[in-house]
Amino acid sequence: MLEQVFRDEWGRVLASLVGFLGDFDQAEEAAQEAFAIAAERWSTSGVPDNPGAWLTTTARNRAIDRIRRDRTLAQKIQLLPVPEATVTEFDDTVIKDERLELIFTCCHPALPLDGQVALTLRALGGLETAEIARAFLVSEETMKRRLTRAKTKIKATGIPFAVPDANRLPERLDAVLAVIYLIYNEGYRGRVDLGAEAISLGRVLTALLPDEPEAHGLLALMMIHHARRRARFSGDDLVLLDDQDRSLWDAQEIAAGRAVLDRAIALGGRGAYVLQAAIASLQTRERIDWPQVAQLYGRLADLTGSAVVELNRAVAIAQAGDPEAALRAVDELDLNSYLYFHSTRGELLRRLGRDDEARAAYRRALELATTTPEQRFLTGRLEQL
């Protein structure tokens, strides 16, 4: 119970403190101290009606006490609006929700991408440094350095703690969505906890930007994919869509994802994430309309100019019953260093009875495979041939 409250409230509390103090490290120290006090007191007194307000106020007061004790910061005290009220006098209507400002600060383009990802997970998701390090398969010390560099750059370059102006918002929002999607994709490759963290971040973003269709599109996309997570692997074996046990799919999450997609479409969403969510939704139907999937991939390719999207469109064309047309489309793509280009060619060649060429394509894919499930899947395909 307490752990869930802490996870739910961390981002909001930290955002308020960063806005109040203007310093990430001081804000984190104050937040951690407030959470420690809460863990001690709430275990006996129970969780207050407004835990976020309680935590934020306690953290602010602790930060102010620390600054007052530090004589070298005496002048700064005069600049701080010091609240005189007690904790019980604060409620959710008094404390502004500044998580949106924090999201745009963490995902500022001046920061390196790995720093954006790490800081977003730490600041908004409330993950410990060790948890983030384990998720990305790096040492805790490496992740600590990434976070430190990101915070230092924010302070040194004066990255604003603010929502961008209207004329800059679309491009900055694209960067935020890309960071959240990158976090999700890391989880989708098998580290499910990261996938859940990305969905949680997506929910925060749609709550803060309720009229942004692409935010809803991304959330829908992640939810629908996440609903199939238990069926995507059998032990260390990768299971393709056609072979997945649908009883393992989370029907409630699929339905919830479709509802979010409906909201995105109602808002006029026609962007890349909305299209991808629509494709994902179609692929969870009992009978998949592959020609419609191919059509949506075509629209997505026109929008993005992505060769990988064209590859996915070719797969849909093959599933619709025309592997020869699919192979012609694949052979026009310049994706020689991309694992799934070669595995897709291998599958199409196998379907067309061109076994020798299929073996060569699968062998090339196997050379590029980096994970155990990918390697096992490709080895199995070669053994079948």
Image (spheres, rainbow, N blue to C red):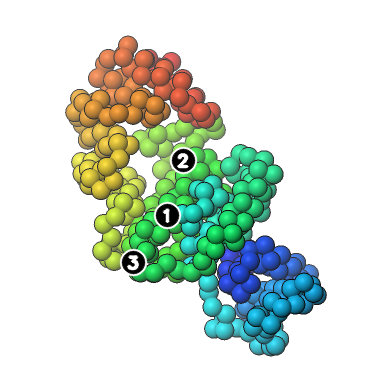
Residue, disc 1: 175
Q: Residue at x 55, y 33 (%)?
A: 235
Q: Which mark is residue 231?
A: 2
User: For the residue marked with disc 2, what is the amino acid?
Assistant: Ala
Query: Can residue 328 be seen?
Result: yes
- The image position of residue 174, as x and y in percent, is 38, 56
Amino acid marked by disc 3: Asn
- Distance CA(mark 1)–CA(mark 3): 15 Å
Local crowd at mark 3 within 10 Å, few (<14), some, or many (≥20)?
few
Residue at horizontal 66 percent and vertical 67 percent from the top: 27
Question: What's the CA distance linking mark 1 and mark 2?
Answer: 31 Å
Pointers 1 and 2 in contact (C-beta within 8 Å): no
Disc 3 is placed on an element classified as loop
Residue contact at pointers 2 and 3, CB within 8 angstroms: no
Q: Secondary structure at mark 1?
A: helix
Q: Residues within 10 Å of mark 1 (few under 14, many from 20)?
A: some
Disc 2 secondary structure class: helix
Q: In the rendered view, tell whether residue 374 sits above or below residue 75.
A: above
Judge depth for marks 2 and 3 and give the one in front.
3
Q: Which residue is rendered at x = 69% and y = 44% of the image?
A: 141
Q: Is residue 176 left or right of residue 52?
A: left
Q: Which mark is residue 167?
A: 3
* In this rendering, the label closer to the viewer, 1 or 3: 3
